[in-house]
Each structure stands twice: as structure tokens, then as C-alpha cells.
Amino acid sequence: MGANADILIVADDEASCLYIEKLLSIKPWHIDKAWVGSKALELARQHAYDAVVFDYRKPGMDGADVCRRIGEVLPRARKIFMTGTPNIDSVYRAVEAGAERVLPKPVDPTELVEVLEMQLAAAE
């Protein structure tokens, strides 16, 4: 699965989604993007993603809410959070919502790829 994984990026704006997509483009993964929670849920209902990368803060529905709802649709998908405020509250909410990992922003590109590879391998 890791080599041909399907990844959904859920960030707070189009520029952030494109930036994360560029970071992940070193791998042969299929990547979809959503910067609105409702669009992320719609994509999750249409496609069985192997992993979802969330931004914790989102307009409207926060990342924890989106994670929880996507987890109901895609219970096997690995969930990785990125947050600019990696405090105990945001980390706890992310883990409670189903995140396997929480990364601080700005995210280290190498770390993000490594975490995704580890999470995808763990799901196999």
C-alpha cells in the first residue's frame, strides 16, 4: 500500500494544500486536496484513502471534527495532524479524534514523509 497510497490533504486554504502536495510529490502517492471540511468529507465518502493529513485549525469545522467524521467513513485510514499550536489541549483533541500522529507547524518535509511512510506501513 505504501508505494501506491492514496492521501487526502485537509488544510486551511488552497495554498497550504498545494504546499503540502508539493512536499509529498517526491513519492508516487495519489493526492487529493480539500480546504473546506465539507469537501473533505465528500471526498472521503467517494474514495478509500489510506491516509489523511489534517491541519488542526480550519475555518468552520476544526480539524478534530473533520478527523472524527472522516474516521467514521474511513476507519482504516491513518490520520496525521499538523498544528501551529502544539499544546496539550490541541494534541489531546487530535488524538481523541483518532489521530495517530501530531506534527508541529511549520512541518518538516522529511519528517512528514517519514511519518506517512511509517503510518502506511503500520496499516498493512
Image (cartoon, grey):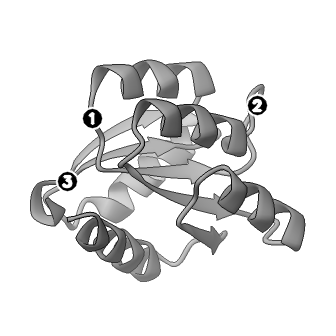
> What residue did someone put label 3 on?
5
Question: Where residue 106 appears, x then y in whole percent?
Answer: 64, 70
* Residue 2, above or below 96: below
Task: Judge the density around disc 2: few (<14), some (14-19), many (≥20) Cα neighbours within 10 Å.
Answer: few
Say which label, 2 or 3, has the lower sequence index: 3
Query: What residue is shown at x 39% (from left), y 37% (from top)?
Result: 74
What's the amino acid at mark 2?
Answer: Pro
What's the amino acid at mark 3?
Answer: Ala
> What residue did someone put label 2 on?
59
* Residue 31 picture quarter: top left
* Residue 33, above or below 6: above
2 and 1 marks in contact (CB < 8 Å): no
Say which label, 3 or 1, has the lower sequence index: 3
User: Which mark is in front, 2 or 3?
Assistant: 3
Say which label, 2 or 1, has the lower sequence index: 1
- Between residue 79 and residue 58, name the one nearer to us: 79
Q: Rounded to the nearest whole Å, what is the CA distance between mark 2 and mark 1?
A: 24 Å
Query: What residue is shown at x 49% (from left), y 28% (from top)?
Result: 40
> What residue did someone put label 1 on?
48
* Residue 73, above or below 62: above
Question: Where residue 14 appears, x then y in whole percent?
Answer: 53, 35
Task: Judge the density around disc 3: few (<14), some (14-19), many (≥20) Cα neighbours within 10 Å.
Answer: some
